[in-house]
Image (cartoon, helix red, strand yellow):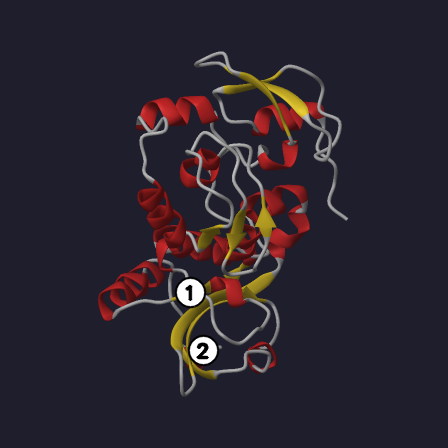
Amino acid sequence: MARKFTDKEFRKALNKDLRALNKYDGKRKKILIECLRCGDKRKKFPRGLINGNHVCAVCAQTKLGIKNRLSEKEVKKILIKKSIKILSKFNGIMKKAKLKCLECERIWNPIRLSETLYINNGCEICSKRFNGAYSMDLFKRKPHLKKEKGITYFIKCTDKKENFYKIGITKQKWRQRMRKIPYKIKRLFVFSGYLPQCTKLEIEIKKKFKEYRYRPNKYFAGMAECLKLDRIRLKIIKKIIDNHAVFTPKNI
């Protein structure tokens, strides 16, 4: 069970432009947040704020100059790139909307459509899955994991209808992990090291290629960590992995 944040830790984890106006009492209880730039105040669920990436919706809209200027066609074009479909009638980006994730089929209703368009990375659930099980924050909460070893793998998955790439981290034996993937597997690059090293490599690749996310037709654990790439981007990934001291499959 994850350790509960203290009020001090929560305030430290907030974006530097945001300030909590009342005491943090768990990530499921709303807290009043003030933007230090524009003065906007609104209640938010803390669990969406503690990664330090959340920004003020009003400031984001002002900076990007998007207040109700986008047409329905333009909005749909942006959302489809995030694998999101609008289910409700389009009433402007400053209004509520009913959205559906085309990857996990989750349905939700953001207070403003603009938050999903420009602030959040699409579906919150799929974004967390794509980020993987390991994070640098996890190692701060559970320092004993820093001494554990694992591998970051980059593989090609194919069958008669699909071909794509998958990245992931595992502490299991190679064959044991690959048995759980219902595709023909080809190992391309493998990095072996301590879990924080493996995680840094995975984060770097996922961050750089997040717009190339791919949803396989077959379900399996880790399917949210797949990419659709061309040869040029594969070469870029190889260079990134080379910089992290690659071990070929023979060394595993």
Name the secondary structure under disc 2: helix
User: Tag on residue 104?
Assistant: none
| Relative horizontal placement of residue 252, taking residue 26 as reference (left or right) | left
Residue occupying image coordinates x 62% and y 72%: 172
Is 187 or 114 nearer to us in this picture?
114
Residue occupying image coordinates x 46% and y 66%: 215
- Asked if residue 32 shows in the view, the reply is yes
- Residue reaching furthest to the bottom: 160
Is 68 or 34 nearer to us in this picture?
68
Q: In this rendering, is residue 87 above or below 236?
A: above
| Nearer mark to the viewer, of 2 and 1 | 1
User: The disc labelled 1 sits on which kind of residue?
Assistant: Tyr
Q: In this rendering, is residue 99 above or below 57?
A: below
Name the secondary structure under disc 1: loop
Circle 1 packing at 10 Å, graded few (<14), some (14-19), many (20+), is some
User: The disc labelled 2 sits on which kind of residue?
Assistant: Asn
Q: In this rendering, is residue 238 above or below 199?
A: below
Circle 2 packing at 10 Å, graded few (<14), some (14-19), many (20+), is few
Residue identified by numbered label 1:
214
User: Marks 2 and 1: CB-CB under 8 Å?
Assistant: no
| Relative horizontal placement of residue 128, taking residue 153 as reference (left or right) | right
User: Tag on residue 251?
Assistant: 2
Q: CA distance from mark 2 to mark 1?
A: 29 Å
* Picture quadrant of residue 187: bottom left
Measuring from the top left, give residue 216's x and y in whole percent.
47, 71
- Residue reaching furthest to the front: 89
- Residue reaching furthest to the top: 39
Residue occupying image coordinates x 57% and y 54%: 134
Measuring from the top left, give residue 191's x and y in whole percent.
44, 66
Measuring from the top left, give residue 60's x and y in whole percent.
40, 27
- Asked if residue 189 shows in the view, the reply is no
Measuring from the top left, give residue 131's x and y in whole percent.
51, 53
